[in-house]
């Protein structure tokens, strides 16, 4: 028998690992790749305290994506949060279907803040969405 062998992993262990990754904990994988998926604006910034959040949004800052399948307005909803858990907005409905399906299949997606521009009381925020492939 080889000194290397496959070990069965319980679904519970995978869920714990995935929860740590979504919480933003640094858990490096030896051959992890960040695969760029889309660039998009963040929808719904007028429904959050964006003026308080805006100063923390600097180029390259990581943003957390979470699924919200019980959202009454969109079962494919994906809120976008700061690493501290403040909701910034959502992936726009017309861009979220494939991302939601990937997340539902257990893929780890995240975003990076790209730019911001005030238009009156509305803050237009651009972000790039990535898949972390391990």
Image: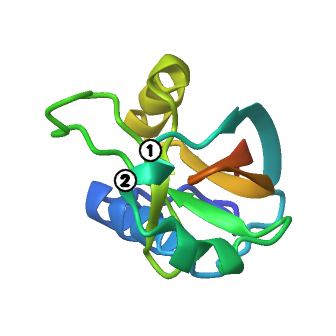
In the picture, which quadrant includes the N terminus?
bottom right
Q: Residues within 10 Å of mark 2 (few under 14, many from 20)?
A: few
**Image spot of residue 48 (x, y percent):** 40, 61
Q: Nearer the viewer, residue 102 or 6?
A: 102
Count of marks placed on residues: 2
**Image spot of residue 67 (x, y percent):** 35, 45
Q: Residues within 10 Å of mark 1 (few under 14, many from 20)?
A: some
Q: What element does badge 2 sit on?
A: helix
**Image spot of residue 102 (x, y percent):** 50, 31
Disc number at residue 44? 1
Q: Residue at x 62, y 53 (%)?
A: 110
Q: Is residue 50 left or right of residue 56?
A: left
**Image spot of residue 79 (x, y percent):** 42, 50
Mark 1 to mark 2 CA distance (whole Å): 6 Å
Q: Nearer the viewer, residue 123 or 121?
A: 121
What colour-coding does the image apply? rainbow
Disc number at residue 47? 2
Considering only vertical position in the picture, is 108 above or below 9?
Answer: above
Asked if residue 83 can be seen in this view, the reply is no
Q: What element does badge 1 sit on?
A: loop
Asked if residue 26 can be seen in this view, the reply is yes
**For the residues bearing labels 1 and 2, Cβ distance under 8 angstroms:** yes
Q: Residue at x 69, y 79 (%)?
A: 55
Q: Is residue 57 left or right of residue 91?
A: right
Considering only vertical position in the picture, is 25 above or below 22?
Answer: below
Q: Is residue 127 left or right of residue 45?
A: right
Considering only vertical position in the picture, is 77 above or below 63?
Answer: above
């Amino acid at each position: 028998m080889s000194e290397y062998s496959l070990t069965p992993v319980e679904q519970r262990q995978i869920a714990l690992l995935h929860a740590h990754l979504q919480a933003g904990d640094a858990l490096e994988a030896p051959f992890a790749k960040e695969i760029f998926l889309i660039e998009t604006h963040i929808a719904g910034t007028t429904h959050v305290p964006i003026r308080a959040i805006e100063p923390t949004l600097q180029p390259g800052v990581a943003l957390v994506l979470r699924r919200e399948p019980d959202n009454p307005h969109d079962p494919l909803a994906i809120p976008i949060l700061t690493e501290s858990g403040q909701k910034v907005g959502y992936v726009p409905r017309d861009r979220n279907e494939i991302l939601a399906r990937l997340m539902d299949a257990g893929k780890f997606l995240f975003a990076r803040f790209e730019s911001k521009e005030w238009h009156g009381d509305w803050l237009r925020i651009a972000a790039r969405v990535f898949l972390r492939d391990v």
